[in-house]
Amino acid sequence: MVRPRLKDVAELAGVSIKTVSNVVNDYPHVSGETRARVEAAIAELSYRPNLSARSLRAGRSGVVALAVPDLDNPYFAELATHVIEAADRRGWTVLIDQTQGDRAKERVVISGIRDHLIDGLLFSPLALTGKDLAGRDERTPMVLLGERVGTGRSPYDHVGIDNVAAARAATLHLAERGRRRIAAIGVQRTAAAATGRLRLKGYQQALAEAGLPADPSLVAPVARWGRADGAEAMSRLLGSGAPDAVFCFNDTLALGALRTLLTRGYEVPGDVMVMGFDDIEDGRFATPTLSTVAPDKALIAQSAVDLLAERLGGGTDKAHEVCVPHRLAFRESTEMPRKGT
Amino acid sequence: MVRPRLKDVAELAGVSIKTVSNVVNDYPHVSGETRARVEAAIAELSYRPNLSARSLRAGRSGVVALAVPDLDNPYFAELATHVIEAADRRGWTVLIDQTQGDRAKERVVISGIRDHLIDGLLFSPLALTGKDLAGRDERTPMVLLGERVGTGRSPYDHVGIDNVAAARAATLHLAERGRRRIAAIGVQRTAAAATGRLRLKGYQQALAEAGLPADPSLVAPVARWGRADGAEAMSRLLGSGAPDAVFCFNDTLALGALRTLLTRGYEVPGDVMVMGFDDIEDGRFATPTLSTVAPDKALIAQSAVDLLAERLGGGTDKAHEVCVPHRLAFRESTEMPRKGT
């Protein structure tokens, strides 16, 4: 069989050779529909672009990396899905790294060891320090997600949410519903605990604002943010006098806590209200459904991809700081059923 | 700052230059501990290997691709986590593609358009046909996961489970517990439905074996395998005379069905038993906890990575067919509480 050429792909797809070339080179200014038609023709003909020439011409691999702690955490799985979709709209492929929030692995991510493969990096670090970042060679554009790293001015674009305000609003919601012994699950004793510290701060602010005492026995530390950790922390809280509400720093902790409460015969929300954070899909189908803080994950992903695209396009002005909005989702775990129904 | 050299990394890590070179070139015969020490030293020194020379020498990128339908499905998120871990033990990075089970996207995955980036491909296709596969240029090693594609002899290694046997055992479990109106949720009317067809076959075999009639009104088709689809299908089943058990073709369908049952006031398992498939973590923390078919996901991932490593090492004998074992996990959604407790 004669090796198919660019011209053959263009003919089959009914587009110009220039358009095929744009698709092959991952240039963004091709509509999704046209791109799909060209890709179908490429598949049909088993066409292979002359890749060494391509790389030299474009200077781009068409690949960006997304580094997250853990895809087993539905928040990061959902975020990754949104990032892949946003990247796909630009014709980019996403390479995913899992760091387990381990500082050594996070330092490898920013070390540039794979920079020949990727055009840019989207990174949600947990354990990285400001010093780690300061030592980075900045040749490959990077956008940071999640908590700010370090305290100084950062040269990196950053997309996050206002964790203190969100945690404060979630806790106030519980106080407004008349709860007085509001527990918190999710503080961590590790360096990789910035998010937990911010959510604890919001929780404490809300208690003060509602005139409730800050009882340290109501703050349950955990090793990790998984369902099993939430279940175990809730058992500990029940052992030292049951709270009447619990704010969990993410939804998997909350789903674990919920399981413990229901197993022990507590009614939710009657005896104990439960509030989570992240709005993962699991919580919307739990019984009772889980009230939660809902950050706009699609917008986080879109903002990060847009910022990276701007950097790749040569944008060199100062680092952008994007704060994506969140809302509270009130569901059955904090909504008392109406009397008489 | 003087650009650090291989020698500096070796010195800091306390290993030989040869060992650093092995790590940089992603050769598998380096222990995890040594690799971690070298990577830490690489990060510490911001060492960058001379990558063009490296690629020429090794002829490898150290990257493999994993293509799955959807990371939002916890089964694939958990499988991806296991694949990343197994690949990490060989020093490989995993690039993840989402295909949405769309045939055009799946054909792009096997088209070789990104083969310059990857050493090999692990692929869990949904819509791909035997003809699509037959037309593939086989230069980049590929291992298939999930259902077999096409009917003929395949040149590709394949890792799967025995879906018919697993679905049959799951359904028989419900019959053995005295259930007579056992419904099934998960048949799809699309081409990308091989898994569903096999699980339906196992369900039907079990009904015949248990002497139960095959009532077509108890088989509820769905568009996708998500929680919302399971919830909606359960509503339909309840509208046409409630079943006393339901076998859902995956756990997210089952969690959706469970939500509908509890919302409508049905007791699970008392009124309706619920059985899922996949053993995702969500089901272990639902109330009631979800009985399910538990395929050995870690072994699926490990087998696929091992087969790919064998191909990359030059293994050229005929394609391997690996059937990974499964077990049934009996939890609260099918276990009647003991009388008197």
Image (cartoon, coloured by chain):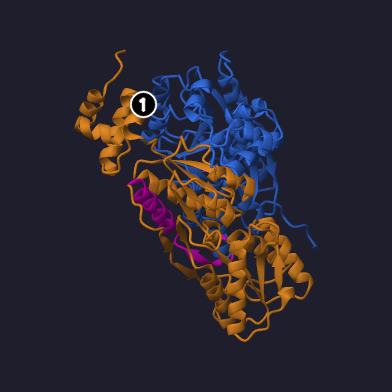
Chain colours: A blue, B orange
Residue A238 in the image: above or below residue A173 = below
| Residue A290 or residue A171, whichever sits in front | A290
Q: What x and y, as percent, mark residue B242? A: 73, 75
The part of the image, by quadrant, that contains residue B261 is: bottom right
Q: Write the start and end of the magenta stretch as one range.
A: B286-313
The amino acid type found where label 1 is placed reads Leu
How many numbered marks are there?
1
Residue in the foreground of this view, choosing between B148 and B249: B148
Q: In this view, does A254 lie above or below A190?
A: below
B279 left or right of A337 in image:
left
Up the image or down, B267 lies above or below A289; here it is below
User: Is B230 displayed left or right of A126 in the figure?
Assistant: right
Tell me if I can see residue A248 in this picture.
no
* Location of residue A330 in the rendering, given as x and y in whole percent from the top left corner: 70, 47
Q: Residue A183 versus residue A120: which sits nearer the camera?
A: A120
Residue farthest to the bottom, as pictured: B211
Whether residue A278 sits left or right of residue A338 in the image: it is left
Looking at the rendering, in which quadrant would you find the N terminus of chain B? top left
**What residue do we see at 67% from left, 56% from top?**
B224
Splitting the image into 4 quarters, where does residue B250 fall? bottom right
Would you say residue A32 sits in the magenta stretch?
A: no
